[in-house]
Image (cartoon, grey):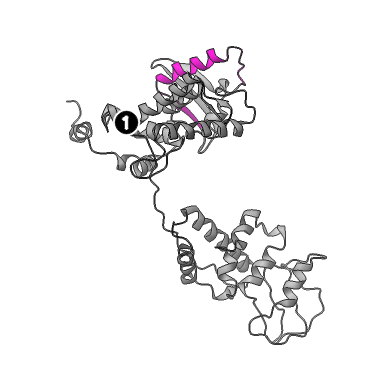
Amino acid sequence: MGGDVFLPFVEPIAGNAEFASDLGGRALAGVEELDCLSFKLGREPSSLCHTTPPWGRIVPPFEVSVKLGLAHCSLSLATGDKHLVYTPETGLLTYFGDKDVRQIRTKDVKSYLQWMKGKRSVPFAFNTYSTRIACLRKILKLAVDDEVIDAVPATPRPERKDSPRGFFRFAPLVSKEHDEYQRVLRTAKDMADEGVKVRWVPVTDEFYDLILFLSHTFLRPTYSEIYALKHRDVTIANDPKRLILRITKGKTGFRQVNTLEAAVGVYQRCQRRYPNTTPDEYVFYPQYKNRHTAQNRVSRIFKALLLRADLTKGEDGIPRTLYSIRHTALSMRLVKSKGQVNIYNLARSAGTSVEQLERFYLKNLPPSADMARNLQTFGDD
């Protein structure tokens, strides 16, 4: 039989020694001797001199296919994809390196996921599994494009286990004496009053106000939300008294936030703290033009607060971070509304979804008399 030898994903690269050595040193499965190799480059006929090999089509093992597939940037495998392929511990090449790409089936992908799980005692995050499966599918799609395989095999969806959100217990879930959220606020105030410094950065009332602001706006303590907020993004509104915030590049994209009334007083203190501010100035820690710097310094101060208040972990062993303030605020709103809050409006203001509220907050809240009354209501006659 005549025909070219098909090596998928190959494009010519002048002077690429690694590319040449990969080909020269690799014995292709099922072929003992070939006088010369012919390559089908993309969709163009080969211009290389060749003799006809014994088979009409030879497919290299996965390792050769992957290496050649990554040899040229036009194949749209980004730097992150290369990392997923070549990581020694769990990379695709480590597991699939000796497999013929034509023989990869769904069961092989399932075996790969199980193999990954056995690599460590603490499970990998869901995203760790899913990104590798996505990268494998991307490579196999290239094999389909080069007519090496007919179709990408079905790939299993990695099992997803929700990680509980760490939050601070608050009254009425616990007694006022054991209210952890109030302990956070008291500790922040004490640190500011005492002039505590964390790695030479003084703790001030601005740190206390930032915690309160997060609690009453449901913003994320991230570079793109609380630390990106400028005065031009804030409007004080009435009936009811509240702030309207414009979050331009939040985790879920653009949104407008209706805050709780208490956020207004916090914002007005920020205005008095920096009286000569302009609309383009940041609301919190405007002296840090690099907002990642602002975020990192506040995070370090909050870690020091947790150590001082003995609140680094909850009773369930889940670590607390500044993000726990947001989780506490959402849980507090659900509880203190006495079952009356519209969870769609809450999810919209918080930049999340009703599903997320149900998965991470509602199902973990203990039943209360208010929830029971809400369940049993028949509305107004």
Instruction: Look at the image and tell me whether residue 345 can be seen.
Output: no
Residue 365 screen position, x and y as percent: 29, 39
Which of the two residues, 156 or 186, is positioned nearer the viewer here?
186
Instruction: Look at the image and tell me whether residue 26 can be seen.
Output: yes
* Residue at image coords 27%, 32%: 174
Residue at mark 1: 170
Residue 32 screen position, x and y as percent: 69, 87
Q: Is residue 259 magenta?
A: yes
Q: Secondary structure at mark 1?
A: loop
* Residue at image coords 28%, 27%: 177
Three-letter amino acid code at the position of disc 1? Phe
Residue 196 screen position, x and y as percent: 51, 24
Up/down of 232 relative to 312, above or below: above
* Residue at image coords 31%, 42%: 364
Answer with left or right where residue 17 lies relative to residue 239: right
The magenta stretch is: 255-280
Q: Is residue 369 magenta?
A: no
The quadrant in which residue 4 appears is bottom right
